[in-house]
Image (spheres, grey):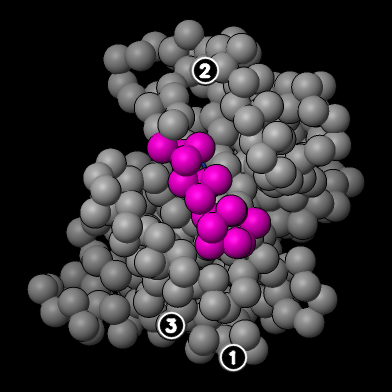
Amino acid sequence: MTSSRPAISFEFFPTKTDAGHEKLLATARQLAEYQPDFFSCTYGAGGSTRDRTLNTVLQLDGEVKVPTAPHLSCVGDSKAELRALLERYKNAGIRRIVALRGDLPSGMGMSGGGELRYANDLVEFIRAETGDHFHIEVAAYPEMHPQARNLEDDLANFVRKARAGADSAITQYFFNADSYFYFVERVRRMGVELPIIPGIMPITNYSKLARFSDACGAELPRWVRKQLEAYGDDLQSIQAFGEQVVTQMCERLLEGGAPGLHFYTLNQAEPSLAIRNNLGFAR
Ligand code: FAD
């Protein structure tokens, strides 16, 4: 984290095709010019992207030269598989990891053969296996994890991850800054001080965003949804409006003390860069 500006990070997903991978690298090179604090790369729960995540992380870290954090989920991986991945990352000089439970594709059962059930178990496992080598990020849900019974349980489970040894957290995306402030305040009252970085989703496409938000429990405020719907196929207006709404939220978050911003890039540079640049950060 640099001291002069909030921490900025960009998230990618590993692609299935060579063409997609080339696009990802081009996006990463463009974003690297803005000196982000780190990149991260997602992991398909159950190991569906095990090799692709590994290769992408090593390439972003080694060739694009931005410190890159692999996401790692425990829900479908055995301890031996997790141990082997941790070893590879450690030997490659990777120092940050995003530790998650993950969501298995339907039909794979609750654990999918994994031996660790929740993200706090994975954090404990990483600490037991590798000591303090990794800076461990965990997920946070200002609008509640969709499977949580209630906010109190979810907060207690978040605190469990912090106590298991997490260093900082990245949130699920949201479009309501108050949910973030309330979450942070509650966590602080429970005696947990780790930095909680808002995850930021640029708005570029209404139907995909609506579908994805339903699945992950992120609320699209009514007024935003109505306005996006009204634009119909007019992508330019959707993007201009989305950029304005998300930029204003980021301004509020930073003014209110958020220690940084983590952009869900969906492997595209421009939408995240537009917001970053609107915020007036120096390179
Ligand atoms: P947990 O923290 O384990 O929580 C899951 C649920 O269980 C919550 O409802 C919680 O309240 C409850 N819970 C937690 N601990 C306990 C406990 N000890 N006892 C009882 N209940 C408990 N998914 C992927 O598959 N790959 C990715 O790369 C990926 N990256 C992500 C990055 C970020 C920043 C975020 C926010 C999410 C990401 N996800 C990813 C999605 C994530 O895997 C899902 O949201 C998943 O359902 C929960 O993962 P978690 O690590 O938050 O789980």
Q: In the rendered picture of this protein, how many numbered marks are placed on residues?
A: 3
What amino acid is labelled 2 in the image? Asp
Q: What crowding class fits label 2: few (fewer than 14 Cα within 10 Å), some (14-19), or many (20 or more)? A: many
**276 drawn magenta:** no
- Above or below — where is 191 with respect to 199? above
Three-letter code, disc 1: Gly
Q: Amino acid at mark 3?
A: Ala
Which is nearer the eye, 211 or 15?
A: 15
Say the numbered circle drawn on residue 77.
Answer: 2
Chain part drawn in magenta? 52-67
x%, y% of residue 250?
56, 76
Residue 122 at x, y = what percent? 67, 25
**Label 1 CB less than 8 angstroms from ligand 1:** no
Q: Please, which residue is most extreme toward the front here?
A: 63
- Name the one closer to the observer, 228 or 274: 274
Secondary structure of the residue carrying tag 3 is helix
**Pointer 3: what residue?**
274
* Rendered image: mark on residue 280: 1
